[in-house]
Amino acid sequence: MYVCLCHGVTDRDIREAAENGVSSMRQLGKELGVGTQCGRCASMARGILRESRSPDYLALASMLATPA
């Protein structure tokens, strides 16, 4: 799903950035441009970033990345 239409950023892009160490909206803005144009995406992006950094999400991502 597109979160930031101004910069063409999807929820997957945000999750990938979180997996690569992005932990704040400031970093997300620098990396992907999220929230730097019109700002309508900021609250949605913040929620996705927060969710992606949660221990439950990280445990699930780790489990899915491990070969069976």
Image (cartoon, rainbow, N blue to C red):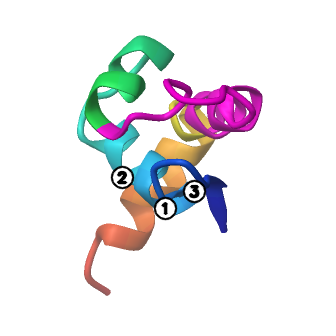
Residue 1 in the image: above or below residue 25: below
Any magenta on residue 49? yes
Contact check, label 1 and label 2, Cβ < 8 Å? yes
The quadrant where residue 51 appears: top right
Residue 12 in the image: above or below residue 42: below
Most foreground residue, 42 or 12: 42
Cα–Cα span, label 2 and label 3: 9 Å
Contact check, label 3 and label 1, Cβ < 8 Å? yes
The type of residue carrying mark 3 is Asp
The type of residue carrying mark 1 is Arg
Residue 4 in the image: above or below residue 35: below
Residue 60 point in image, percent of width and height: 53, 57
Residue at 49% in and 24% down = 36
**Image mark for residue 12:** 1
Any magenta on residue 52? no
Which contiguous range is marked in magenta? 32-51
User: Which residue is disc 2 drawn over?
Assistant: 16
Residue 61 in the image: above or below residue 21: below
User: Which residue is disc 3 drawn over?
Assistant: 11
